[in-house]
Amino acid sequence: MNLYRLLQQRAADKHPLRVALIGAGKFGSMFLSQVRRTPGMHLVAVADLAPQRARDSLARVGWPAEQFAAPSFAAAANSGKTFITDDAPAVIASDVVEILIDATGNPAAGIRHVLACCKHGKHIVMVNVEADALAGPLLARRAAQAGIVYSLAYGDQPALICEMVDWARAAGFEVVAAGKGTKYLPAYHDSTPETVWDYYGFTPEQVARGDYNAQMFNSFLDGTKSAIEMTAVANATGLTPAPQGLAFPPCGVDDLPRILKPAAAGGWLHHAGQVEVISSLERDGRPVFRDLRWGVYVTFSADSDYVRRCFREYGLITDDTGNISAMYKPYHLIGLELGISVASVGLRHEATGAATGFRGDVVAVAKRDLKAGETLDGEGGYTVYGRLMPARDSLACGGLPIGLAHGVRLKRAVTRGGVVTWQDIAAPDSDAARLRREMEAEFAREWGVISPAHETV
């Protein structure tokens, strides 16, 4: 509330929020379409590995060419125009940038950008939920130590779920479950970039006409993206995963209070206070009635006769006890809503969701029998998918995070359905891997846990 009024004041004062975007893909382009319509914001720079792609994106969403023709950061700052570059480190280091948006989707790049923002004192909005799932708990700590705001991206489902959880708790309700909808069947875990289009119902002609990335689309289908997003929610809200990970129960919006409650009370959950993703398909493939495929939800409890009566009086749908009800948002607008995070971070120094602990993790699981010597191809590929696990369980088994399961070689075979561990691979030598191992070691010490991956801890 009041963000628009505060933005208008910044515009009137000729002191707009100075913003830079790294990554001009789909999410970034959606933000580009809105930022020039938003008072009190100045997009100083866009960085992309292919600068022409950034220019094409700006033109496609309606920017006049002269608006993104600034020849330098200084020229952009003085003219109100936008500078296009391929030099992300220079963008972060620039004195004219206050808030950075990482929309790269690359976990290693995201980690580099957060650490650079810590060094240069820039707030960061992380569209890059892959990086957050890999190392968000430690990145958020580093950001707090540096005095900057680290925030999940509004418009993406994790931040919207965090908002709903916060609403329920601030209103005095106990949160029973929170999550999102998706299209899911158990067979999807085996999907590869070759099979993904059949599952989506896309014809070869549709695929040929569009700019479709099969591996990216497959990461949404095979359960990996759901696991990544629920990891971010668990780490930000204090809700926790079930020991077996996501169950993907078929559920429409009218059945949320009945299904999204603990099994002991007749629902599907392992425990109260759980993250869970619901499916828009029944297990036999039939569509769920009034599904929530594109939306987010929270279920919460009344815990008093008076509130249960209020639920009835105001028409809330409840479970059969009348004690559990639900709120949901049927859609999320992705990058079109990202300005909410930018405004919240810049005007209030408040994140729209950020890790407060290490509660969930996404580990790599073999899609088929994998042989020693094979190379893993990461999120949405042919070899592994990501499974949500409680973080303590992940550390206890030495699970390899999905964010590092790309381009690494197996030292030993892993059977279909098996968790790939650090001990199964030739460990990657990268900044992202080192930061992840540092995070694991830090939390293992705090918990008094000795992991197979950290036997010296």
Image: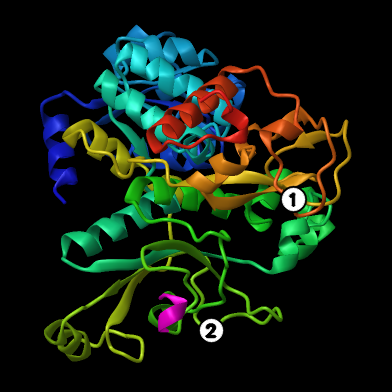
Q: Mark 2 points at which residue?
A: 289
Q: Which is more N-terminal, label 1 or label 2?
A: 2
Q: Mark 1 points at which residue?
A: 418
Residue drawn at x 35%, y 46% is: 236
The vertical placement of 327 against 449, above or below, is below
Helix, strand or loop status at disc 1: loop
Q: In this view, does 307 lie above or below 366?
A: below
Seen from the viewer's position, the closer of residues 122 and 377 is 377
Q: Does the magenta portion include 263?
A: yes
Which residues lie in the magenta part?
261-265
Amino acid carrying label 1: it is Gly
Q: How crowded is mark 2: few (under 14 residues within 10 Å), some or many (20 or more)?
A: some
**Residue 177 screen position, x and y as percent:** 38, 66
Name the residue: 33% across, 53% down. Answer: 162
Residue 212: tell me if it is visible.
no
Residue 248 at least partly seen: yes
Q: Is mark 2 on a helix, strand or loop?
A: loop
Q: In which quadrant of the rendered view does residue 25 lie?
A: top right
The structure residue drawn at horizontal position 50% and vertical position 40%, both measured from the top left corner, is: 133
From the viewer's perspective, tell me whether residue 145 is left or right of residue 90. left
Residue 13 screen position, x and y as percent: 10, 26
Give the main secondary structure of the magenta stretch: helix
Q: In this view, does 348 lie to the left or right of 287?
A: left
Residue 285, picture quadrant: bottom right
Residue 309 x %, y %: 16, 89
| Three-letter code, disc 2 | Phe
Q: How is the image coloured?
A: rainbow
**Left or right: 204 as drawn, with respect to 244:** right
With 27 as the anchor, is 15 left or right in this view? left
Above or below for 167 versus 234: below
